[in-house]
Image (cartoon, rainbow, N blue to C red):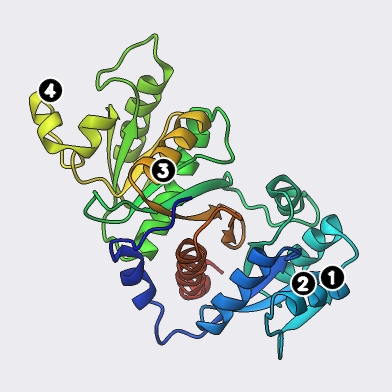
Amino acid sequence: MTATTGSGKYEELLARCKGLPPVATAVAHPCEQSALAGAIEAGALGLITPILVGPAAKIEEIAGKANIDLTGVRIVDAVHSHAAAMKAVELVRCGDAELLMKGSLHTDELLGAVVARETGLRTGRRISHVFIMDVPTYHKVLIVTDAAINIAPALEDKADICQNAIDLAVTLGVKTPKVAILAAVETVNSKMVATIDAACLCKMAERGQIRGALLDGPLAFDNAISKDAARTKGITSEVAGDPDILLVPDLEAGNILAKQLSFLANADSAGLVLGARVPIILTSRADTVRSRIASCGVAMLAAHARRQAMPASV
């Protein structure tokens, strides 16, 4: 991803983290320089307290070569990436960590440990991914979901994907998130499943099956982002031109959209997996330092919100 100076939206989010204690975070297999440095840097900023899970000798070797200071950092030895994923999940299950962070292992390997029926972090909610995007040409942080996990989600899956994103947006300070449900057109067409799903999701929100947000769809991308485009099409909508969340029809559309925003609009994107017992920080070697730190900051806010909600749900 192209490095950018950003537009200040991430900095506003990180400002919300000041004064909050860091959150213990199990970092699965940080056996590559950028993965290790990202976790340690987030720790130095007071966002997380990293617990490094992986082959201890290899982690220490990488740190030595990259001049990364591991003084005071807990390392839990695990012989390989699969064992590291399982052990990191175990640390969350036993309460030693409140967040899970991907190191240099494959996403599928980490999520395999997360969704394991007996030993994982499953809930009744569908797991989904969100990109929290700082787009220089847009007036606020924009959440794009799901662009990384659910390939062709059914209607019920989309309801969970939507609720996961809404809950996160509320955590980030949005009182009533606005959700634009994207399709190729803004009218319902029986031959286009995305438009039918969009209409159903809006009705589900009216009936309380999706809570805490204002939904509208189907909306084409131009109508979702631009009030002028919506007005030209005769669309009257509180969401059009001002969405907090873009709910995409499938993974391919979401992935293409997120990467277009990154590479053509110079957007930064933080990444989280939601719907498990704890938020999961997903970073890649292509992420800017700013994006990695933002991912940790957003996860930290979500973890503190979860703490506050826990007594009510017990």
Q: Distance of mark 4 from mark 1, alpha carbons? A: 58 Å
**Structural crowding at the residue carrying mark 1, measured as other residues with C-alpha within 10 Å and reported as few (<14), some (14–19) or many (≥20):** some
Give the structural element (helix, strand or loop) at label 3.
helix
For label 4, the residue is 233
Which of the marked residues, 2 or 4, is nearer the chain's N terminus? 2
Percent of width and height locating residue 310: 52, 71
For label 3, the residue is 263
Q: Nearer the viewer, mark 4 or mark 3?
A: 3
For label 1, the residue is 58
Give the structural element (helix, strand or loop) at label 4.
loop
Which of the marked residues, 4 or 1, is nearer the chain's N terminus? 1
Which of the marked residues, 1 or 3, is nearer the chain's N terminus? 1
Q: Amino acid at mark 3?
A: Phe
Give the structural element (helix, strand or loop) at label 2.
helix
Q: Distance of mark 2 from mark 3, alpha carbons? A: 30 Å
Contact check, label 1 and label 2, Cβ < 8 Å: yes
Please determine whether, in this image, residue 156 is positioned above or below residue 114.
above
